[in-house]
Amino acid sequence: SRACAYNPLYTSVHSTFEMDSRSCGYVSILSTRHSSGNEQIRANEQNVQDTLFCEVATKGVDTMASSVLNHQTKMLLVSALKSLMKTIKLDRVTISDITKACGVSRRAFYYHFEDIYEAAIWMFEQDLGGVITLSDHQWSINIGELLEYVESNKVICLNAIRSSQGYRIEELFYAKIKGCMASYLLSLCKRSSLEIKNIELISDCYTISMLAIIKSWLDGTISCSREELLSLFEQTIE
């Protein structure tokens, strides 16, 4: 790995994390671009790249660089998965499909994810993390943004829910919606007769109903606009 830093093959390197020479001098290459069309050279470069991915992550040479690199590698993988899910059923997507699409090896994939479904769950966690927050008074804004997200990613969401592991995806959406509703209901306890002991049950009731309605809306069983659906939720809960 030390020698690769002086290899002429790596004279055109983009996005490089260089470690302190006192820490074994590991160099981790996120993305390489060469004009050569030699497939063997590219294969060798990929092997070195994948080895360094794992070395930086497991040896803790530089914690921050390792964390950034790991996150970026995972993002490459799930971005490829998301693109594939637009045209291929999740159950039929293979790890080879993903790794070929983003230029990362199977070894790197298995370092980060146990299987394709775990990668899909992580993908949705990243997406929903920026959509739903546990704000006391903004539940309708959060749910509105959730509806906008699933509408914009309709094919991908339906693909995931209809897969053999769809229940795992639903559990993630369930937890996000319930967290939002529980936060709102908890705030009501401070200014109404609602008792804290009932929040769990009431949150479950709202969440089960909302998730079922959203699924029916996505597959076309319920026909209405996103704005109309949100208005229905607001009238029911408020």
Image: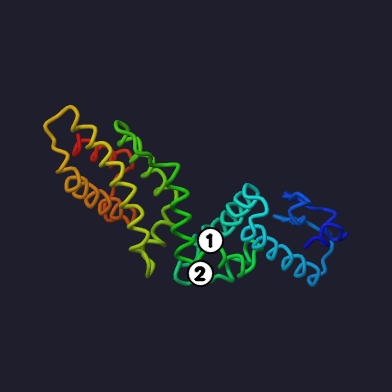
Badge 2 vs badge 1, beta-carbon distance below 8 Å: yes
Task: Specify the color scheme.
Answer: rainbow
Q: Give SS at disc 1.
A: helix
Q: Quadrant of residue 97?
A: bottom right
What residue is disc 1 on? 81
Q: Nearer the viewer, residue 138 or 51?
A: 51
Residue at the spot 39% in from the left edge and 40% down from the top edge:
145
- The residue most toward the left is 193
The label on residue 23 is: none
Residue that carries the numbered disc 2 in the rendered image: 93
Work out whether residue 180 or residue 152 is closer to the camera in this orientation and state it.
Answer: 180
What is the CA distance from the residue labelled 2 to the residue labelled 1? 8 Å
Give the residue displayed 13% in from the left and 37% down from the top: 195
Q: Secondary structure at mark 2?
A: loop
Tell me the crowding category of disc 1: few under 14, some 14 to 19, or many 20 or more residues within 10 angstroms, Cα based. many
- The residue nearer to you, when weighing 87 against 6, is 6
Residue 37 percent across, percent down from the top left: 82, 66
Question: Mark 1 or mark 2, which is nearer the start of the sequence?
Answer: 1
- Horizontal side of residue 74 vs 168, given as left or right: right
Quarter placement of the N terminus: bottom right
The spot of residue 139 in percent (x, y) is 30, 36
Give the x, y percent position of residue 36.
84, 63
Whether residue 129 is situated above or below residue 221 in the rendered picture = above
Q: Which residue type carries mark 2?
A: Val
Question: Which residue extends farthest top?
Answer: 191
How many numbered badges does the structure rendering display?
2
Residue 85 vs residue 135: left or right? right
- The reply, left or right, for residue 23 in relation to residue 88 is right
Compared across the picture, whether 151 is left or right of 97 comes to left
Question: What kind of residue is marked 1?
Answer: Leu
User: 89 or 180: nearer the eye?
Assistant: 180
**Horizontal and vertical percent for residue 177?**
31, 46
